[in-house]
Amino acid sequence: MGGAAPGAGALRLLRAAAETETRLAAALVDGLPDRALTVDRWRVLQHVAAHPGASMSDVCAALALAPATATRAVDGLVDTACLYREADAGDRRRVVLRPSRRGLDVLRAVAPAVAHVEGDLRGVLGDLLADRLP
């Protein structure tokens, strides 16, 4: 009865994802030691930079974040002048998010560290998925 236990591949993928998030968090801190850029804040900032005018609902749906987590991340980014909140021109009840120049500078500053972690993740995923490819 050799072979891997059922679910072993999924466990390896989850472990790789958790280790990658830990490496990404460390890379963000190393890239910007004077700022508190968490993984969630980086994800939100990255999304809003790619989708200016996104609403909080858009952010939650796109990043699979709970509303409270997204709110904490946005609050931190607004407090550090990386994001702006503004009323939607078409519906004043709706709040939209826009990156600031400082927020875009932050993304540029951490881009090399993020790219390094992304490369590591691609290597790990390639190794894990190679077992499943025909």
Image (cartoon, helix red, strand yellow):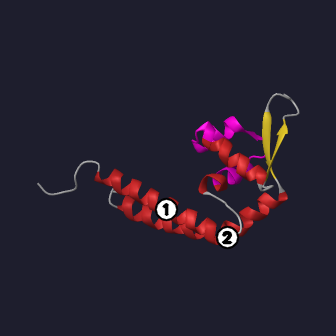
Q: Indicate the quadrant where residue 4 lies.
A: bottom left
Task: Please give the name of the residue rendered at 62% of the width and 37% of the height, measured from the top-left corner.
Answer: 67
* Magenta segment includes 100: no
Q: Indicate the quadrant where residue 102 lies.
A: bottom right
Q: Amino acid at mark 2?
A: Pro
Residue 77 vs residue 46, the one in the foreground: 77
User: Residue furthest toward the left?
Assistant: 1
Task: Please give the name of the residue rendered at 66% of the width and 45% of the height, measured from the top-left corner.
Answer: 72
Residue 84 locus on image (x, y percent)? 82, 47
In the rendered structure, the answer to whether residue 98 lies left or right of residue 61 reads: right
Residue to which mark 1 is pinned: 20
Residue to which mark 2 is pinned: 33
Q: Indicate the quadrant where residue 113 lies.
A: bottom right
User: Crowding at label 2, few (<14), some or many (≥20) Cα neighbours within 10 Å?
Assistant: few
User: Crowding at label 1, few (<14), some or many (≥20) Cα neighbours within 10 Å?
Assistant: some
Position of residue 34 relative to residue 129, above or below, is: below
Q: Nearer the viewer, mark 1 or mark 2?
A: 2
Which residues, given as a range, are shown in magenta?
A: 43-68
Quarter holding the C terminus is bottom left
Which structural element holds mark 1? helix
